[in-house]
Amino acid sequence: MVTTAAARRIKRRAVAYKTFGQCAIWLVLLLMYLPILVLIAFSFTEATNIGTWTGFSWNLYSRLFQSQEILVALGNTLLIAVISATLSTILGTCGAIGAFYSKKRARSVIEKVTQIPVVNAEIVIALSLTVMFVFLQTYLFGGANVFSFWTLLVGHIILQVPFVYLSVKPKLQQMDPALYEAALDLGCTPNQALFKTTIPEIMPGIASGFLLSITLSLDDFIVTAFTRGAGLLSGEKNIETLSTLVQAKIKKGPIPPEMRALTTIIFLVVLVGAILVTVYRNVKAKQGKKRVGRY
Amino acid sequence: MKSPKSRKSQHFFGNLKRIVSFKRKYLSIPYFIFLLLFVLVPILIILVYAFTGTDDAGNLYFSFDSFVNFFSSPTKVNVLVVSLFIGVLNTIICLLIGYPIAYLLADKKVNKNYVMVILFIMPMWINFVLRTGATRDLLNMWGLKGGEYPYLSTMIGMVYNYLPFTILPLYTTMIKLDKAQIEASRDLGCNPVQTFTKAILPQSVPGIISAAEMVFMPTMSSYVISDTLSEGKLTLFGNSIANSFYNSLWNDGSFMAFIMLVLIFVTMALTSRFGKEKEERKVGLW
């Protein structure tokens, strides 16, 4: 009797703890998503300010796709993200492979320099690059404007490339070094061996470096604002990305109504992405279990 | 029948080929040059600009003008002090909220699902300027105007933005906690408070350090969050640097960036023992 009462008490406590824990998690999650969810809710009504409901409508969505300004910014953002992430991935992967096969001293120098942009404040990266471009502009180009898509691209690559390096590095360390040697022994040239053994082995690291680069680029404001010039879809005007456009708008007033519709779309894209990541993880975990089971 | 001379030249070309031929370590050369040109050189130029002035003809001359300008201006020093304060405060609040949440997320008795962790990371994938604007508009809707309560609304925006960055490194430490040690402390008669201070807290110090690193520096150097949520009423160090950029005050801006760099190196030196964690956490996002 006593033992069952005690057992029941312990069980009750465990249940209470679990309920409390889950409530706390959900409460914080709700608070974190509240601003976004409110924007999404009010993307289905046309009022200028959130908080006033003027009846359900899809109009903001059609207005979004007619807004030249937003579409240009969105296009620029995506172009910059894809171009800079691709270049960063190539540069960072090569850097990681090269450093991995370098002598210890060379490697430690490369790693130290890699750490600088990682720990540095974004605004310092942005300002130091800008000051250098201004310096070049004044003393090398005789005052001609150097700020363009290219300076912006350099800024974005600097933000991303250390993280590609750091994503690839652990995969190189886990790699089986005998594979490369075997490929050479079987008659591969060093180039072929690299592409047929090393690259496939470190592919997960390259992929996560690329995805991380994309997110860093999409989210960046300060480096873009400092280093941009005219170009891309903005033509003669300064390149406008989503971040800089939204910042310019919210400095003057509330988020423009069309952007509420855009938030909904971004949220859905991110949600689908998150679901895919989860599914991929689960599938991989299951495969891993199977493989372990076989041996 | 080869003359010794031709054999020598063959030897030379053989060597040359071996030197020029592809070696895997050469792959890091473009990467290193890129970092050299766009990371190290800019920082050197910042250091030059921080301790020079520009005359009317555009020539640089050595001076401590920016240094004197900064430290003789009470408003500028005040901005630095306020930024440090806000940075510390935000770090503490994020840790106070993030720590228990990360613990609960990692506790198998409460949550077995990795989806919950993804839900906490997901806001990071939505454009942060948009999120900041959304927070401001929501606070306005509730009558909390940034112009009237600049500190309060900025703090809310900061916590809101940096909480995911705190939870992620804490979570990665928490799932590695030694459960046996916690059980043992309970079995040996520790009460929950003692278990926490003696078994859980010491094990999670690396996570706390890297979470604090993730929050402190970005908070005090942030620009968009303070500018938007306080309606321009609250100037943080990041805003000061950005303002010097918008006014083309390169020397003053460089000096402030130099102060930021010094602060970064000081915090790095203080936390270097736990440096390994930091690079892993952002990469761990994927």
Image (cartoon, coloured by chain):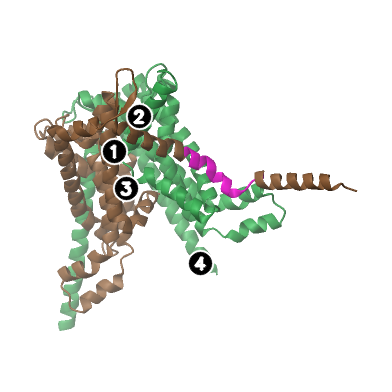
Three-letter code, disc 1: Phe
Q: Residues within 10 Å of mark 2 (few under 14, many from 20)?
A: many
Mark 1 sits on what residue? B258
Q: Residue furthest top?
A: A236
Give the CA distance from mark 3 to mark 2: 34 Å
Closer to the camera, A256 or A230? Answer: A230
Mark 2 sits on what residue? A131
Residue B219 position within the rendered picture, expressed as x and y whole percent measured from the top left: 23, 42
The chain that hosts pointer 3 is B
Answer above or below: position of B243 versus A182. Answer: above
The answer to whether residue B87 of the structure is visible from this angle is yes
Closer to the camera, B220 or B156? Answer: B220
Mark 3 sits on what residue? B121
The span picked out in magenta is B21-34
* Tag 3 near tag 2, CB within 8 Å: no
* Tag 2 near tag 4, CB within 8 Å: no
- Tell me, by letter, which chain the rendering colours brown: B
Tell me the shade of chain A: green
Give the CA distance from mark 1 to mark 2: 12 Å
For the residues beneath circles 4 and 1, the answer to whether they share a chain is no
Q: Secondary structure at mark 1?
A: helix
Q: Secondary structure at mark 4?
A: helix
- Left or right: where A273 falls relative to A179: left
Q: Please tell me which residue is depicted at 22% across the width and 34% down the height of the picture.
A: B67
Task: Based on the picture, tell me whether residue A211 belongs to the magenta stretch.
Answer: no
The image quadrant that residue B243 belongs to is top left
The chain that hosts pointer 2 is A
Three-letter code, disc 2: Val
Q: Residues within 10 Å of mark 3 (few under 14, many from 20)?
A: some
In front: label 3 or label 2: 2
